[in-house]
Image: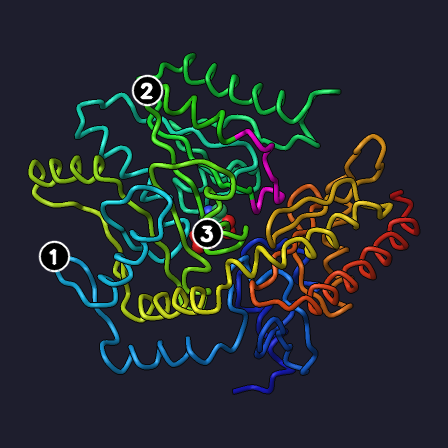
């Protein structure tokens, strides 16, 4: 192996980095991480960083959890690989499916496993089509998502995603995917419109869309309880109640994408429980294994399962599945992760830590650069603006969010910037109250440095 100091140069010559300005990256190079413990990660020079994003909204238990390491190693020794094709099975997949059925906020008949949130949402699209074909409703196929939604990057999931960068020049979205309004009151409400009135208007817009397209053509609606990558957007209190009523009225299958919000992020097992709606199905991933190994899943209600049985009888096979669907090592790690969440009461603990987290977060709203500081549970976003009074955004090419994240990194804090200069924070659930304070102290210093820089650059 070459010495670690060469890693950055080797990276630039060998890797394509997701979600990166590939041209600018050639000058900045990577931050190469070496190891982690708790909420801290360390680069190859030994410098510590507080991981304020739990990786990519996923390492609920933080780094270096020996129980998870042991669960993976033990399973690798016992049965390193097993699949679920052609009726094969293994104990871990069975037990995990039972556990998820028990936990899920949607009435669940069966569980389907995959390895990523994108695969889970692509599978949702395929199963909705399959079900409605079985039910003799071949025209009921369109799926409604929302502007600024994030549901992944595979062809169908990226089509559900409502962010331009995921679609431009990828020739997406595919036909049959519609996008309705984003429930961001601060940014999109009309002057003087209350949260309640805004939620009613969005529900009416959804209903108009369904009626205009024809309810017999609309199969499903998919939503994240709190939008993550679209900018950490918390909907108005009554939004989901009103949206659910519209979906139910028009026989629209409702999918809650719990890939970020699932497993305690908002202070309960699932985000839909916190936001007060009952979906027909959920997609989960990320914190299911605390991200130690890739695993995702979706739930299948009884009516869909019956339709799948009919299709199987007709076609001869359910023609979908991944090599790694229900991978035994991932299942063992997921079971151990869920055991630790329950034993340590981490979802309740997240709810208990949320007031301090949200108080420190919303206090950032006073900062001259911050238009809105918003969050729920242990996830938050701060939207940086050029003018607080008018909410005017910076020019995207000024790269203000990127600059703030860079200053944070220099302050020993990892956060992320999202489109629209939103800086997101989503620490591991195991973060302590002292570490929450440490996180926000570092973030304030980063914002101050960003403000000085923006003034020097005459951006403000
Ligand atoms: C809500 C949501 N759904 C789906 C995905 C896609 O998951 P993956 O990156 O594992 O494909 C993500 C990823 O961030 C997500 O936040």
Dot in front, 3 or 1 = 3
Do callouts 2 and 1 mark residues in contact (Cβ within 8 Å)? Answer: no
Q: Earlier in the sequence, mark 3 or mark 2?
A: 2
Query: In the structure shown, which secondary structural element does the residue marked by tag 1 occupy?
Result: helix
Q: Mark 2 highlights which residue?
A: 217
Q: Mark 3 highlights which residue?
A: 262
Give the Cα separation between the discs numbered 3 and 2: 30 Å
In the rendered view, would you say 264 is above or below 46? Answer: above
Q: How crowded is mark 2: few (under 14 residues within 10 Å), some or many (20 or more)?
A: some
Instruction: Point out the stretch of residues depicted in magenta.
Output: 228-239
Give the Cα separation between the discs numbered 3 and 1: 30 Å
Q: Mark 1 highlights which residue?
A: 86
Q: How crowded is mark 1: few (under 14 residues within 10 Å), some or many (20 or more)?
A: few
Question: Residue at the spot x=22%, y=61% of the render?
Answer: 94
Query: In the structure shown, which secondary structural element does the residue marked by tag 2 occupy?
Result: helix
Query: Looking at the picture, how far across and down is residue 350, in whole percent?
Result: 57, 58
Q: Residues within 10 Å of mark 3 (few under 14, many from 20)?
A: many
Dominant secondary structure (helix, strand or loop) of the stretch shown in magenta:
loop
Do callouts 3 and 2 mark residues in contact (Cβ within 8 Å)? Answer: no
Snapshot quadrant of residue 425: bottom right
Snapshot quadrant of residue 237: top right
In the rendered view, would you say 139 is above or below 57? Answer: above
Name the side, left or right, on which 419 lies relative to 255. Answer: right
Q: Which of marks 3 and 1 is nearer the N terminus?
A: 1
Question: Residue at the spot x=56%, y=46% of the render?
Answer: 228
Determine if the magenta segment contains residue 235. Answer: yes
């Amino acid at each position: 192996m070459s010495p670690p100091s060469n890693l950055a140069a080797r990276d630039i010559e060998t890797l394509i980095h997701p979600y990166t300005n590939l041209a600018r990256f050639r000058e900045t190079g990577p931050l190469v991480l070496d190891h982690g413990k708790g909420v801290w990660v360390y680069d190859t020079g030994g410098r510590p960083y507080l991981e304020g994003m739990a990786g990519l909204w996923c390492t609920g238990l933080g780094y270096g959890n020996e129980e998870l390491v042991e669960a993976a190693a033990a399973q690798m020794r016992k049965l390193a690989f097993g699949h679920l094709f052609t009726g094969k099975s293994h104990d871990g997949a069975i037990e995990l499916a039972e556990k998820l059925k028990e936990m899920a906020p949607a009435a669940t008949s069966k569980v389907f496993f995959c390895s990523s949130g994108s695969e889970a949402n692509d599978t949702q699209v395929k199963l909705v089509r399959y079900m409605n074909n079985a039910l003799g409703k071949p025209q009921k196929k369109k799926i409604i998502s929302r502007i600024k939604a994030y549901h992944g990057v595979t062809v169908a999931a990226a089509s559900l995603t409502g962010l331009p960068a995921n679609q431009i020049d990828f020739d997406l979205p595919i036909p049959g995917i519609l996008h309705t309004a984003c429930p961001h009151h601060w940014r999109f409400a009309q002057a003087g419109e209350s949260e309640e009135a805004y939620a009613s208007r969005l529900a009416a817009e959804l209903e108009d869309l369904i009626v205009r397209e024809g309810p017999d053509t609309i199969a499903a609606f998919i939503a994240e309880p709190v939008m993550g990558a679209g900018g950490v957007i918390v909907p108005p209190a009554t939004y989901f109640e009103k949206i659910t009523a519209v979906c139910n009225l028009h026989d629209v299958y409702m999918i809650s994408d719990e890939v970020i919000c699932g497993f305690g992020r908002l202070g309960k097992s699932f985000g839909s429980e916190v936001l007060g709606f009952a979906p027909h199905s959920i997609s989960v991933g990320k914190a299911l294994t605390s991200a130690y190994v890739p695993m995702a899943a979706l739930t299948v209600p009884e009516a869909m399962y019956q339709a799948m049985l009919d299709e199987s009888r007709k076609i001869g096979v359910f023609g979908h599945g991944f090599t790694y669907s229900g991978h035994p090592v991932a299942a063992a790690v997921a079971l151990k992760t869920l055991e630790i969440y329950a034993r340590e009461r981490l979802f309740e603990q997240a709810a208990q830590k949320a007031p301090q987290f949200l108080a420190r977060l919303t206090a950032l709203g006073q900062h001259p650069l911050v238009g809105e500081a918003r969050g729920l549970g242990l996830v938050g976003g701060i939207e940086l603006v050029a003018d607080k009074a008018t909410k005017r955004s910076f020019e995207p090419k000024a790269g203000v969010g990127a600059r703030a994240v860079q200053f944070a990194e220099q302050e020993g804090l990892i956060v992320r910037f999202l489109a629209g200069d939103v800086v997101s924070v989503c620490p591991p659930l195991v973060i302590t109250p002292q570490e929450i304070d440490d996180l926000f102290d570092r973030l304030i210093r980063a914002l101050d440095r960003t403000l000085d820089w923006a003034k020097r650059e005459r951006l403000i």
